[in-house]
Amino acid sequence: MDDNEFLARRFEAHRTHLRAVAYRMLGSLSEADDAVQEAWFKLHRSNTSEVENLGGWLTTVVGRVCLDMLRSRTSRREEPLEERVRLPDPIISSADGVDPEHEALLADSVGLALLVVLESLAPPERLAFVLHDLFAVPFEEIAPVVGRTPAAARQLASRARRRVQGAAPAPDPDVAKQREVVDAFLAAARGGDFDALVALLDPDIVLRADGGTLRPGGLVRGAAAVAGGAIYAAQFAEVARPALVNGAAGAVATAEGRPISVMAFTVTKGRISAIAVLNDPERLARLDLTVLDEG
């Protein structure tokens, strides 16, 4: 085995972990793959003979690559964040359980509600929170990546943590009970039962819809408004199939075998506290739904 093959094997041993880091940083599966590939290029060009912890070294490299990508994304954004909702890429699994390929990506129960909040953080805050709180990277290793002292990196993570705790509701852990609530919501939407819908929703529920550049999306707040919208869009409930979306109870609406909507639900204390709806035709067309047929 030559040096390049040995290095490649060592890198492959960390690829799954690095992809999980990048997905949490970027909320995009394709960009996460790009970040991991860039880390491989950097490894191939670097002298790592004195690196004792290659996994830790690669994690910080991926973090730095993702930080640059986030900063570039922010600088080229033309529209204010509040004018358009852009949801992270959903990870769809059979309602029977998460498939092995997605287990590492969802090891920390990274629901869309959490990723949506992470999207609102400044890039250095997101990096400090993700690396420290989700992957236990010491602040001494995070500090050089964000160009701050360890104490300042700790403050970044602390600010991000407060935002996350205040804005991302903690889901109920029992997926079977989540499914009961989601199924009841879909049944009430199909039947046009406004009162039943309101009873299933947290009074302060937030629905986020991402229709891409061609369809209007945005935010809907409050149980009455969300219930009214669910009745208006009952046709989606009619063709919804149960699925796990980022490890939580969700649904995928299909027509003629093609996805027309992905719905992710956050169920907190027996009520739906957040809904994320992706109906962007371009992004939906890239989804692989074969896992639903296998479930």
Image (cartoon, rainbow, N blue to C red):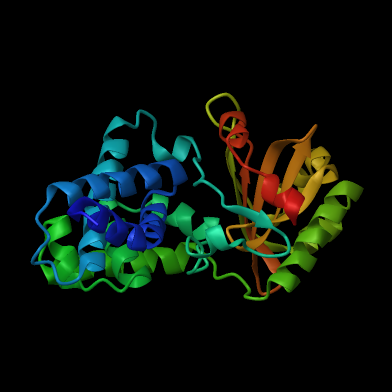
Q: Quadrant of the N terminus?
A: bottom left
Q: Residue at x 41, y 39 (%)?
A: 81
* Place of residue 130 in the rendered image (x, y in percent of width and height, measured from the top left): 34, 63
Q: Residue at x 59, y 30 (%)?
A: 216
Q: Is residue 147 above or below residue 86?
A: below
Asked whether the viewer can see residue 56, the reply is yes
* Place of residue 209 in the rendered image (x, y in percent of width and height, measured from the top left): 60, 42
Residue projecting furthest to the top: 214
Judged left or right of residue 122, residue 238 is right
**Residue 2, image quadrant:** bottom left
Q: Nearer the viewer, residue 197 or 130?
A: 130
**Residue 163, image quadrant:** bottom left
Q: Is residue 210 above or below residue 137?
A: above
Q: Nearer the viewer, residue 66 or 200?
A: 66
Q: Quadrant of the C terminus?
A: bottom right
Judged left or right of residue 133, residue 278 is right
